Image (cartoon, grey):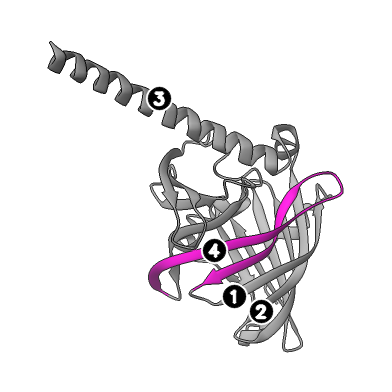
Amino acid sequence: MKRFLGLAITIALSGAAISSQAQTADEIIAKHQAAMGGDAKLKSLKSLYSEGTMSVQGMDFPFKITVLSNTAMRVEFEAMGTTNIQVATPTGGWFLLPVQQQTEPVDANPDDMKDIGSELDLEGELVDAKAKGHTVELVGKDASDGPEQYKFKLTRKNGSVAHYFIDPATFFITKRVTTGNVQGQEMTLVTKLSDYKKTSDGYSYAAKIEQSPMETVVVLTKVTANPPVPDSTFQKPAAK
């Protein structure tokens, strides 16, 4: 009888723990959503414009980024006296890089764009993940980089996987780990986010972004929510 009772209690507590974990995952994401500006603010984001400096191998490059939510992104950066442009959409994109002696725009490899949707989702992948076709699992806590962080596994609807780490004190994302293609090689990509700031209308963003193994550091000096974005922003120039 005691063994049966003990087993029943164990099963009941296990079920409660599973339920508690699922609820806790939702609560953590909800607090993250609130830290980023709240549900209404995130859902109102239709476009985002950013300026800053990108440091690569000791060299600094000024850049501008325009994102139209879930539609397209344009990155423009200055290097060695040239203006370079990269445009990405969920189905493709193009780039024009005079710094690499290009004189005509070149279409991007669609395979390189398969996970670009994560960069175009201005709400963030974790917010309303299920409605977007993703699966989110709270793995537990991780202290590999110092203080414990909540660790989430997100499986996108296309099958690719990303791990997100959330600070339990601020509920900001501190790190994202994915697998991607860099110069033809599949490798683990680590993005660290810090120095969070707010726009004048209450949207939070990471002003410092570090990416490895490319050893790239991005510092944002200006962020504007919902600027007007002409359709021509993402149009590929006609060949000369």
N-terminal label among 1 and 4: 4
Point out the frontmost of discs 3 and 2. 3
Look at the numbered disc 4 and give the secondary structure of its residue. strand
Q: Is residue 156 visible?
A: yes
Q: Amino acid at mark 1?
A: Thr
> Mark 4 belongs to which amino acid?
Thr
Q: Nearer the viewer, residue 206 or 223?
A: 206
Q: Which residues are magenta?
A: 184-212
Q: Residue at x 67, y 86 (%)?
A: 59
Structural distance between the alpha carbons of marks 4 and 2: 14 Å
Q: Please indicate, yes or no, whether residue 238 appears anywhere in the rendered image.
A: no
Badge 2, how many Cα within 10 Å: few under 14, some, many 20+?
some
Q: Which residue is mark 4?
A: 191
Could you say which is closer to the camera, residue 120 or residue 12? Answer: 12
Question: Where residue 160 appears, x then y in whole percent?
Answer: 40, 51
Of residues 204 and 230, the one drawn nearer to the viewer in this rendering:
204
Residue 216 shows which numbered tag?
1
Q: Earlier in the sequence, mark 1 or mark 2?
A: 2
Frontmost of labels 4 and 3 is 3
Residue appearing at x 20%, y 19% in the figure: 6
Q: Are marks 1 and 2 in contact (CB under 8 Å)?
A: yes
Asked if residue 189 is among those painted magenta in the image, a careful observer would answer yes
Q: In the rendered view of the protein, which quadrant contains the C terminus?
A: bottom right
| Point 46% across, 39% down: residue | 134
Badge 1 element: strand
The residue to which callout 2 is attached is: 55
Q: Secondary structure at mark 3?
A: helix
